Amino acid sequence: MTASPTAAGVRRRRLELGRWDRLLVILAGASAVMLVPRLFGDPLSVDPDAWRLTAYFAAVTAGAAALPRLRSSLPLDLALLGMALPYSASMWLLGYDGPLGGLLGPAYGLARNVWSGLAWALLAVLVAIVYHRLCPDAGMRILTRPGWTALGLGLGGSLLFLAVAFLLPGPLIGREGVPLLSLSGGAGLSYGIANATSAIGQEIQFRGVLLSALEREQPARVAVLTQAAIFSLAHVVVAGPAADLIPVVLVLGLLWGWMTQRSGSLWPAALGHVVADLFLLTALVSGLYGG
C-alpha cells in the first residue's frame, strides 16, 4: 500500500513550482517589455530598451516590497533590477551631453569610458549592499578571502580561456577589438580601466547577487545554469539576438558560475572575466589568427 503524500510535502512541491513559475513570468514580462516596442520603433535601439527594462524590474521589485504575498520574491526581483540598472546608468553616463557633461570629458571619449566603467562597478556594489541588508545570510561570496583553490581556479581558468581563444578564428568569438596601435599611451590605460571595472561589476551582479538569489530557490547546479542563461540574455539586449558572441557568453557564464561555487569566492571568476574582456578589447584585430 503506497503512502499518500503529506500535506506539508504537497505544499512544498507547490511552493517549488511556484518559484519556477515566478521566475518564468518575470522573464516573460521582461521579454515583452523589450520586444513589443520594437515592433513599432527602431529595432536597433539599445539604450532606451535598457532603461525600459530597468523601469520594469524596478516596478516588479517595488510590487514585491509592497505586497506581502509577493515578498518572498523580493531577493530575486532585486537581483534582476541590479542586473539592469548599472548597465543603463553607465551607458547613459558614457553618452551624456548635458550642461555638466564637460566636467567628465567629451561624450564617448577616453575619460568618459573610465567614468562609465567605474559607475558600473559602484552601482553593482551598492545593489549588493542593499541585497545583503535584505538577505544577510545570502552568501554572495564577495568578501570571501580567496584561498589556494580560488587562486588556482582563477589563474587556470584565465590561461585556459586565452589558450582556447587564440586557437579560434576571430569571427567565431564574436567581434573585432580596437586596433592595437590605437591603444598606446592613455588610450590603453583608459580602455583597460573601463573594461576591468565593468567586468568586476558584472561579476558582482551575476555571480554575486543573482547567483545567490537563485540558490535560495534552486539546486546549486540549476542555479549556475539559470544565471548563465540570464547572463547570455543580457548580452542579447546589448549585442542583438544574432550575435555570434552569445554562445561563448553562455559557456563563460557556466564556467564562471561553477568557479564561484567551487572556490567559494567571487574573485576567480572576476579575474577570468577581466582577462576575457581585455582579450576581446586588444586581440581581436582584423586579420589576426584567421580573423
Image (cartoon, rainbow, N blue to C red):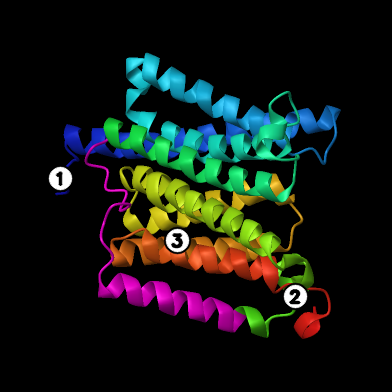
Image quadrant in which the C terminus is located: bottom right
Q: Which label belongs to residue 273?
A: none
Q: Which residues are magenta?
A: 135-164
Q: Is residue 151 left or right of residue 193?
A: left
Point out residue 183 in the picture as x, y percentages from the top left corner: 72, 66
Indicate the amino acid at tag 3. Answer: Ala
Indicate the amino acid at tag 1. Answer: Ala
Q: Are marks 1 and 3 in contact (CB under 8 Å)?
A: no
Q: Is residue 24 magenta?
A: no
Q: Please give the residue where the numbered disc 3 appears in the rendered image.
A: 270
Picture quarter containing residue 169? bottom right
Q: Are marks 2 and 3 in contact (CB under 8 Å)?
A: no
The residue depicted at 44 percent of the width and 32 percent of the height is 77
- Going from the N terminus, do you reach mark 2 or mark 3 first? 2
Q: Is residue 247 left or right of residue 176?
A: left
Point out residue 200 in the picture as x, y percentages from the top left corner: 48, 54
Indicate the amino acid at tag 2. Answer: Gly
Mark 3 neighbour class, 10 Å CA radius: few under 14, some 14 to 19, many 20 or more: many
Q: Please give the residue where the numbered disc 2 appears in the rendered image.
A: 170
Mark 2 neighbour class, 10 Å CA radius: few under 14, some 14 to 19, many 20 or more: many
Point out residue 277 in the picture as x, y percentages from the top left corner: 60, 63
